Amino acid sequence: MIIKTKLRLFFLILICLLKFSFAQEYDKVNGVWNAAFLDFPLSEKISFRTELHLRTISYFSVWNQHLFRPQLSYKASKNVSWRGGYTFLRNFDQDVTKDPRIRNEHNIWEQVQFILPLKKASFSTWIRLEHRFQEELPLKKDKSLRSFDFSSRIRFRLTFQKLLSQSDAKIPTNLVFYNEIFTLLNPPGIPFKFNQNWTFLGLRVKLSDKLSINSGFQKNTIAKSSENYLKNRLWNTILFYKF
């Protein structure tokens, strides 16, 4: 009797999960994400970074996003660092015929990162809190009539890196995997709603002491409504340069 009850409960849960899965609707796009991270050391512990991102969908044919992110970094210890900065985003509607098509966003953010070194590998995690000012929808053609609404979200990223080449290789190569979850915050600052999930798998190649490149496949799952999600499958390449 107990076994039958457990089996019934198991199949009930399974049916509910399948029903929930099929109830979700997914729009799918393919894109390219190119970025450059430029680092300027100011002292032994403080540095300035500028990020420039260009994202497209339908491969290279349709703009998706332009992003500019200046920031300051403070290295509190060997494995702990703090960052804070500003981000300006130009978000493009998928529909190229839409007018107006561009929605601007300004946000201010703070981040803390922890690194756990392992033998020929490492785990790292960072938590970022974003304070977002987005142009209210629907967008108005007359920009002087546009206004901004305020919201916040928290981002949590877990990264694993594994050295694939020999330790003394001229061009060290690492396997890189990360997963990042975005959660919206309500006005009191409590996480309450899923926003996005990013998953990346690729390689990090150190070409010199100043220049490195990350490149690999990334899948972004973005909540559009309670039952509609956008899946963006893209090739992500980031250039890191230290002055």
Image: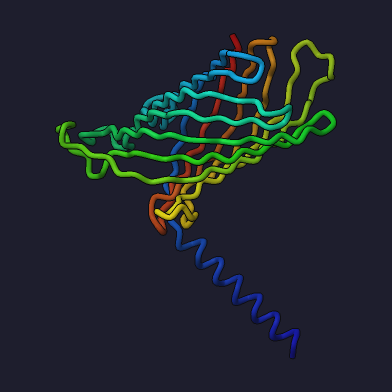
Residue 199 or residue 50, whichever sits in front: 50
Q: Is residue 158 above or below residue 209?
A: below
Is the residue 55 above or below the residue 159 in the image? above
Dividing the picture into quadrants, the one containing residue 16 is bottom right
The structure residue drawn at horizontal position 53% and vertical position 19%, both measured from the top left corner, is: 49
Q: Position of residue 198 (x, y in %)?
A: 55, 41
**Picture residue at 61% right of the left edge, 70% below the top:** 14
At horizontal 47% and vertical 35% (from top left) the residue drawn is: 109
Position of 104 with respect to 85 (left or right) is left
Determine whether, in the image, residue 26 is placed left or right of residue 82: left
Looking at the figure, which quarter contains the C terminus?
top right
In the rendered structure, the answer to whether residue 185 lies left or right of residue 37 reads: left
Q: Position of residue 170 (x, y in %)?
A: 78, 10
**Identity of the residue drawn at 41% across and 58% down:** 227
Q: Residue 205 lies in what quarter of the image? A: top right
Q: Quadrant of the N terminus?
A: bottom right
Residue 34 image point, x, y percent? 50, 23
User: What is the image's colouring?
Assistant: rainbow
Report how many numbered discs are placed on residues in the image. 0
Question: Looking at the picture, does residue 26 appear above or below residue 16?
Answer: above
* Image coords of residue 32 (percent x, y): 48, 28
Residue 57: image quadrant is top left
168 sits to left or right of 19: right
Nearest the camera: 52 or 9? 52
196 up-or-down from 204: above or below: below
